[in-house]
Image (cartoon, helix red, strand yellow):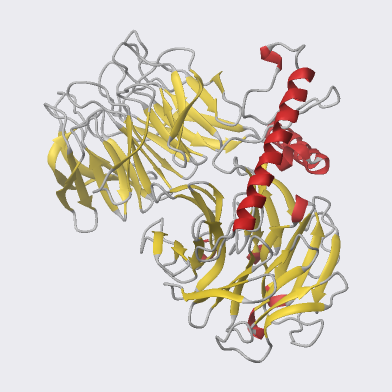
């Protein structure tokens, strides 16, 4: 949700007026009358259509004509549309979809018509026909047409800072306001400017050269200036960590000290709530009230979920916060309910310019689905972008190659666990050829095949789930003679193992996947019945129910694919499942993607892009399967691939780069083989 759009929300401390209530009742009555007219006309217009011909209730119709061979499909996912990202270090703006395709970017083709360096923020203008962006270190702001990318207006002098008319000094947030003015936080000049189309300053908060907290006459260094409903402005001052609210006339309505060291880009949520980022390391995203009381916060101090100088937190929909994690080179989506990262764009701690990479992103906004579908120019642009990847994928389709590694295990093993560690593989537990549970922990060199025993866990186990959390192996549950609730951990540096915690209940036959710094435990068996819960943990010791499957499952195949947890097959209370499900951590909901051609359990899943490749497993007749299936989340399709050599079940599965290793497993009996499955872009295909 963008601040400043939608119905005005009172942001004064508990004030109300009888006249305002009367106007609100009158406005509501007019809305109801208009809605009734629209409903009647719509029913009359559609009275000749069958139920199947009408758009589903509550769903935006996907308008197309005979001239549209490929109607626009907005990719499913947590973003309610498309995400605009100011990729500051790469001097570009990207518009990306849920499936992480880039559907628009600036500059493109021959480059910008005016210098464009260090774009610190990018926001849509009213009606989404423009994008306004500020180039902080270039000391300019620019207004671009959208989606044509033409420069419409600019202010400031490239690479020259100043405080006189026409100059800026380190401009931060710039917004195009509904009244036609442009507001900009002129950070180092300690002021907020309001500019007209003639580039004249029509109003300002604070003044150049006077950097102190004495609003509205003087302000400290201004980090953010966000529009408020009704024409006001929400300002953050770096010095003193002040948050100030000004009316449309520039009157100070209230201010408070934010409970952060560096307040960045406050966003009005309504109801007296403010979302802001703490621009530091480790950073935080917080929701506070107008007195500075913390109502919600996200801020791990270490690990994959830690933020490093987050510059902007933005509510993209109820219950979901997007955060620019600047110095970790990514944008993340965080669930307010679970405090977990459920989607991200950019590889953590990797600067890059290739597809899927960012370099110090520092601004973002949302293009809603409804606007994408109903604005002709935007829709046409998105349809062209949708068609382009089809041709690209045809030329560079993913190919899988399956082969036996040139080395073997010294002893057969099945139902073990494996996780990546420092370029090697940790392998633990499992059943040996005598069907006895094991407790040993080994390192496997994927280049030489050298297997080294480095210790053991306190309890022998098989049929457990595992993940690597902060450099340690965590083993969840599993069985020996009965299902266990133990959470065992092993530190490969000290070579010591211990029982670190306990699951909410005994669980064996479960599966695990990691996503956004969280580990999700799916299904399992509690000694009496199959479980449908999906548990989540960040530290391996505390657990919450993140969601549920439609039915209890043992031995499912599980992997993280494009921000969702894919669950394939498994053993139910009545047989073997064919279902392919996707669980969305942002919403806690599970959706059916498709069905396998045959029931399958004990399989492996390999994630590549938006596709989950299902390998091996055991069918309903107890036979080890050798087929490979491709479940595509973007198209909701399941296909059988013409690939052989994957006849294995109950293998320990681990992915290193583009290679997935299936270690041991079963094909009638326990195996010593290690399969290497490589994914690559096929060349020369059509």
User: Is residue 630 placed above or below 324 in the rendered structure?
Assistant: above
Residue 47 locus on image (x, y percent): 75, 14
User: Is residue 43 placed above or below 405 in the rendered structure?
Assistant: above
In the foreground, 352 or 454:
352
**Residue farthest to the bottom, as pictured:** 209
Residue 209 locus on image (x, y percent): 66, 92
Residue 467 location, quadrant: top left
Identify the residue at image location x=35%, y=44%: 519
**Residue farthest to the top, as pictured:** 621
In the foreground, 505 or 418:
505
Residue 400 locus on image (x, y percent): 53, 30
Quadrant including the C terminus: top right
In the foreground, 161 or 558:
161
Q: In this rendering, does residue 18 appear at all?
A: yes
Identify the residue at image location x=21%, y=36%: 477
Identify the residue at image location x=84%, y=22%: 66
User: Is residue 552 placed above or below 442 in the rendered structure?
Assistant: above
Indicate left or right for 645 with 420 as reference.
right
Identify the residue at image location x=54%, y=56%: 270
Q: In this rendering, does residue 62 appear at all?
A: no
In the foreground, 496 or 46:
46
Residue 85 locus on image (x, y percent): 64, 56
Residue 5 location, quadrant: bottom right
Residue 395 location, quadrant: top right
């Amino acid at each position: 949700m963008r601040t400043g759009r939608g119905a005005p929300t009172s942001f004064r401390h508990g004030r109300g007026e009888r006249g305002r209530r009367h106007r609100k009742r009158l406005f509501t009555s007019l809305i109801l009358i208009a809605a009734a007219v629209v409903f009647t006309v719509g029913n009359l217009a559609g009275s000749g259509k069958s139920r199947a011909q009408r758009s589903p209730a509550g769903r935006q119709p996907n308008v197309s004509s005979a001239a549209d061979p490929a109607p626009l499909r907005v990719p499913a996912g947590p973003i309610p549309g498309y995400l605009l990202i100011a990729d500051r270090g790469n001097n570009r703006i990207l518009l990306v979809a849920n499936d992480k395709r880039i559907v628009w970017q600036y500059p493109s083709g021959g480059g910008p018509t005016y210098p464009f360096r260090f774009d610190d923020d990018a926001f849509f203008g009213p009606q989404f026909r423009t994008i306004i962006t500020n180039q902080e270190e270039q000391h300019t702001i620019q207004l671009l047409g959208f989606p044509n990318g033409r420069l419409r207006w600019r202010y400031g002098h490239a690479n020259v800072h100043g405080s006189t008319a026409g100059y800026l000094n380190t401009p931060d947030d710039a917004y195009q306001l509904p009244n036609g003015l442009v507001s900009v936080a002129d950070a180092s000049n300690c002021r907020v400017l309001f500019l007209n189309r003639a580039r004249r300053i029509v109003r300002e908060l604070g003044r150049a050269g006077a950097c102190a907290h004495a609003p509205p006459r003087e302000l400290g260094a201004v980090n953010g200036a966000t529009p408020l409903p009704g024409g006001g402005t929400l300002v953050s001052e770096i010095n003193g960590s002040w948050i100030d609210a000004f009316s449309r006339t520039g009157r100070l309505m209230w201010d408070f000290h934010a409970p952060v060291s560096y307040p960045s880009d406050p966003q009005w949520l309504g109801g007296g709530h403010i979302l802001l980022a703490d621009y530091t390391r480790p950073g935080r995203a917080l929701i506070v009230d107008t007195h500075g009381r913390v109502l919600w916060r996200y801020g791990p101090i270490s690990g994959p979920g830690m933020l490093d100088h987050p510059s902007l937190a933005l509510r993209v929909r109820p219950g979901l916060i997007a955060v620019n994690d600047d110095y970790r080179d990514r944008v993340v989506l965080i669930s307010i309910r679970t405090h977990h990262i459920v989607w991200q764009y950019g590889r953590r701690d990797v600067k890059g310019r290739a597809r899927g990479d960012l370099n110090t992103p520092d601004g973002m906004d949302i293009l809603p689905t409804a606007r994408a579908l109903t604005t002709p120019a935007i829709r046409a642009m998105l349809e062209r972008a949708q068609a382009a990847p089809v041709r690209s994928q045809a030329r560079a389709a993913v190919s899988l190659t399956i082969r036996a590694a040139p080395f073997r295990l010294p002893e057969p093993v099945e139902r073990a666990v494996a996780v990546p560690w420092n370029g090697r593989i940790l392998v633990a537990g499992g059943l040996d050829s005598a069907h006895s549970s094991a407790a040993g922990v080994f390192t496997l060199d994927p280049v030489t095949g050298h297997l080294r025993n480095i210790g053991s866990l306190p309890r022998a186990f098989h049929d457990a789930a595992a993940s690597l959390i902060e450099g340690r192996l965590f083993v969840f549950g599993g069985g020996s003679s009965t299902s266990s609730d133990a959470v065992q951990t092993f530190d490969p540096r000290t070579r010591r193992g211990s029982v670190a915690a306990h699951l909410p209940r005994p669980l064996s036959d479960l599966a695990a996947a990691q996503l956004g710094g969280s580990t999700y435990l799916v299904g399992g068996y509690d000694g009496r019945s199959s479980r449908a819960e999906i548990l989540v943990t960040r530290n391996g010791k505390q657990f919450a129910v993140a969601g549920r499957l439609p039915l209890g499952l043992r031995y499912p195949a599980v992997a993280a694919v494009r921000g969702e947890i894919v669950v394939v097959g498994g053993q139910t209370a009545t047989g073997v499942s064919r279902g392919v499900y996707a669980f969305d951590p942002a919403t806690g909901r599970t959706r059916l993607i498709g069905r396998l051609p045959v029931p399958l359990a004990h399989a492996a899943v390999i994630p590549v892009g938006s596709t989950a490749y299902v390998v091996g497993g055991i069918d309903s007749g107890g036979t080890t399967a050798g087929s490979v299936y491709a479940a595509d989340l973007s198209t909701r399709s399941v296909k059988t691939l013409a690939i052989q050599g994957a006849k294995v079940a109950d293998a320990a599965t681990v992915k290193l780069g583009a290679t997935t290793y299936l270690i041991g497993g079963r094909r009638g009996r326990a195996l010593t083989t290690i399969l290497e499955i490589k994914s690559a872009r096929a060349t020369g295909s059509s």
